[in-house]
C-alpha cells in the first residue's frame, strides 16, 4: 500500500433530517497519521464507519489509492481493520 493517499471529498451522512456529517473533506498522504477529535455526538464514529464500508455516505466521495470506497464497499472491508474501544474516564478518577 506504499504511496496510497486517502481522500474524503464533501462527505455527508444524514439520518432523516439529522446531519451526522456535513460536507467533510480531508486528505491523508502516505507517511501521515490522521486523527478525528471532537465531543460525543460530533460524527467521528459515523465518518469512520463510512470509510470502512459499514455505512454508505448520503453524498460525497471516499477514496483509498485506486479504490472508490463508496462504489466498492467490499474493497473497503477487505482493506480495513476496525476495533472499537469503550472506556469510561470515570475509572481514571482517583
Image (spheres, rainbow, N blue to C red):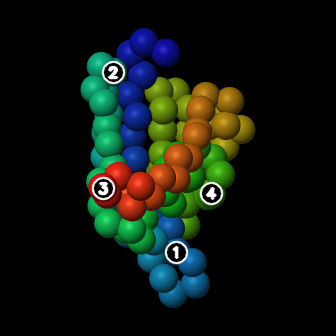
Kindly identify the residue that appears in the image at 45 percent across and 76 percent down: 19
Q: Quadrant of residue 39?
A: bottom left
Image location (x, y in percent) of residue 94: 30, 55
Disc 3, SS = loop
Q: Earlier in the sequence, mark 3 or mark 2?
A: 2
Q: Earlier in the sequence, mark 4 or mark 2?
A: 2
Q: Quadrant of residue 42?
A: bottom left
Where is mark 1, residue-wise?
14
Identify the residue at the far bottom of this view: 17
Q: CA distance from mark 1 to mark 4?
A: 11 Å
Q: CA distance from mark 4 to mark 3?
A: 39 Å
Where is mark 2, residue-wise?
30
Kindly identify the residue that appears in the image at 58 percent across and 39 percent down: 82
Q: Are marks 2 and 1 in contact (CB under 8 Å)?
A: no
Residue 3 or 83: which is nearer the viewer? Answer: 83
Q: Is residue 61 in view from this perspective? A: yes
Disc 2, SS = loop
Q: Earlier in the sequence, mark 2 or mark 1?
A: 1
Q: Are marks 4 and 3 in contact (CB under 8 Å)?
A: no
Marker disc for residue 94: 3
Where is mark 4, residue-wise?
55
Badge 4 density bin: few <14, some 14–19, many ≥20, Cα 10 Å: some
Q: Earlier in the sequence, mark 1 or mark 4?
A: 1
Amino acid at each position: 500500500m506504499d504511496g496510497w493517499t486517502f481522500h474524503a471529498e464533501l462527505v455527508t451522512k444524514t439520518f432523516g433530517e439529522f446531519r451526522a456529517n456535513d460536507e467533510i473533506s480531508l486528505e491523508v498522504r502516505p507517511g501521515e497519521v490522521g486523527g478525528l477529535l471532537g465531543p460525543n455526538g460530533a460524527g467521528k464514529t459515523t465518518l469512520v464507519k463510512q470509510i470502512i464500508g459499514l455505512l454508505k455516505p448520503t453524498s460525497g466521495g471516499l477514496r483509498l489509492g485506486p479504490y472508490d470506497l463508496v462504489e466498492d464497499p467490499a474493497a473497503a472491508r477487505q482493506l480495513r481493520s476496525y476495533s472499537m474501544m469503550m472506556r469510561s474516564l470515570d475509572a481514571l478518577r482517583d
